[in-house]
Image (cartoon, coloured by chain):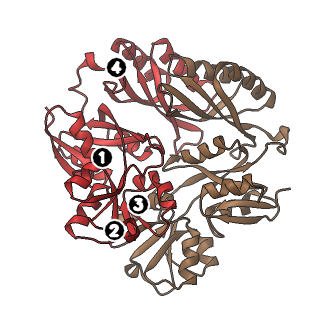
Chain colours: A red, B brown
Amino acid sequence: MIKTVAIQGVKGSFHHIVTQQFFENAVDSIECLTFDRVVDALITKECDAAIMALENSIAGSIIPNYALIDKFGLHIVGEHYLDIQHNLMALPNQRIEDIEEVYSHPMALLQCKEFFKIHPHIKLVEDKDTAEVAQRIQEQQLKGIGAIASVTAAEIFNLNILAHGIQTIKHNETRFVIIKRTNSEVNQSDINKASIKFEANHKRGSLAAILNVMSDCKLNLTKIQSLPIIETPWKYAFFVDVTFENYKDFQKAKSLIDIMGDGFKVLGEYKNAKL
Amino acid sequence: MIKTVAIQGVKGSFHHIVTQQFFENAVDSIECLTFDRVVDALITKECDAAIMALENSIAGSIIPNYALIDKFGLHIVGEHYLDIQHNLMALPNQRIEDIEEVYSHPMALLQCKEFFKIHPHIKLVEDKDTAEVAQRIQEQQLKGIGAIASVTAAEIFNLNILAHGIQTIKHNETRFVIIKRTNSEVNQSDINKASIKFEANHKRGSLAAILNVMSDCKLNLTKIQSLPIIETPWKYAFFVDVTFENYKDFQKAKSLIDIMGDGFKVLGEYKNAKL
């Protein structure tokens, strides 16, 4: 059973909310301020699992996080979707005109860009986490400073929300994955989605050939992303997510792609969170 | 002939460097502080063309810029690759220990993340442009403030480089595109690359079928990126780049994909900058 989970951010962060929604039992969080630290906590066995944001509506894939999973040979064992609502918050009795600087995670700042265009007096400053800024504002009683974070963070750290749902895209869904050191505990009968990586050159049809195999094996593609392999011109890595009804179909596809593509790797086999 | 070009940033910015390298004749730059403003300058005919960064080694595709080209029906008429070298700069006689805050474009801050981990006393602040911060430091004689920008920017604004090449990935290539209101002036015999968009559902094989057509028509795929269509669950938009030797092959593929995929659109036909 998973008891301890590394998250990016502190209590009230979106990663923390994912731990509350995803796991059936209560889990302890290890609060990390970078994704590198999240991975480090997992590798050094400080925790049983870790949560990582992988893609969102406005910025697309968070490529560096794919790279971390790939580089350290970690396994995706589950996924969870969260509709991210960003809120501008500050100490009670502060008005929006009083706010001079807003600190938040770079992705939150990017997602709320349009809102701050109409409040040009506010300076935006990158920080490690959304909720950690809320915590700091309360602990140090910082006036003139705002945080962008969840309603939960405002409640935990007793801040006043000056503006709700300030993200540009109102339905702002982020996909999180649950990662572990091994894939051993996922029940095979639950598996109906997988994330894989393979390499192919830009020669005509090499990707099409692999996608044909997937199609023949009854896999549905739900995501594809090519990335140039920096050291090798004209060669590409593809990160692909597929869903399937029967695990045996996926096993068959794995054997075939392993022969056809270079650098084939399964990043995770897990239960599809969208049904 | 292209005479006036909208760029994101001021003189010394990476977009400005692209205008100097790409066009044979000297062009005037319209300095814009957002990509929205770049597109606006093009639509309102303040300029003949615009430059836009579209993807880079560390963050992958810059999805919002794809969306701008798509939304406003603009055309990619050329591409240019630039090896982005970021440098930390400040007023002369400032040491790195004196720098309290560094202002730069969010993408530059992201690309230099590792460098600043070993200088934790420096606060990172998001700004509109790389070179514009260099300009401001010089004009307002700002001590304790650093910019992350090009060597050209340091030269133009007479700043001292405290650290060269501070980006995490040393070979940090960014792909820029040249966009116009119409595609009319690209010489057909020069065209050997195209950017297209189409939609497909997650039904088994629908993407594979379109890629097969591309392969049959002798197109090489150099990039593929799926994006969920937010309003339509289970339907995806694909942004694909292809190269080809014979324009007639591409024409044939266009007719076929137009029948097979929904929402087919050519975002641009242009000359491949990588040979």
- Foreground: disc 2 or disc 3: 2
- Pinpoint the chain carrying mark 2: A
Measuring from the top left, give residue A266's x and y in whole percent: 37, 28
Residue shown at 71% from the left, 55% from the top: B50
Residue shown at 66% from the left, 57% from the top: B38
Circle 3: is it few (<14), some (14-19), or many (20+) Cα within 10 Å?
Answer: some
Q: Are marks 1 and 4 in contact (CB under 8 Å)?
A: no
Q: Tell which circle, 1 or 4, labels the residue nearer the N-terminal end.
A: 1
- Pinpoint the chain carrying mark 3: B
Q: Which mark is residue A209?
A: none
Q: Name the residue under label 1.
A: A14
Amino acid tagged 1: Phe
Above/below status of B190 relative to A265: below
Report, in whole angstroms, how far the alpha carbon at label 1 lies from the one at label 2.
Answer: 21 Å
Report, in whole angstroms, how far the alpha carbon at label 1 lies from the one at label 3.
Answer: 22 Å
Report, in whole angstroms, how far the alpha carbon at label 4 lies from the one at label 3.
Answer: 36 Å
Q: In this view, does B71 lie to the left or right of A222?
A: right
Measuring from the top left, give residue A1's x and y in whole percent: 13, 31
Report, in whole angstroms, how far the alpha carbon at label 2 lies from the one at label 3.
Answer: 24 Å
Circle 4: is it few (<14), some (14-19), or many (20+) Cα within 10 Å?
Answer: some
Amino acid tagged 4: Asn
Q: Do the residues labelled 4 and 2 touch (CB within 8 Å)?
A: no
Q: In which quarter of the image is residue A63?
A: top left
- Helix, strand or loop at label 2? It is strand
Above/below status of A39 relative to B264: below
Q: Tell which circle, 4 or 2, labels the residue nearer the N-terminal end.
A: 2
Circle 1: is it few (<14), some (14-19), or many (20+) Cα within 10 Å?
Answer: many
Q: Which mark is residue B113?
A: 3
In this rendering, does residue A74 appear at all?
no
Circle 2: is it few (<14), some (14-19), or many (20+) Cα within 10 Å?
Answer: many
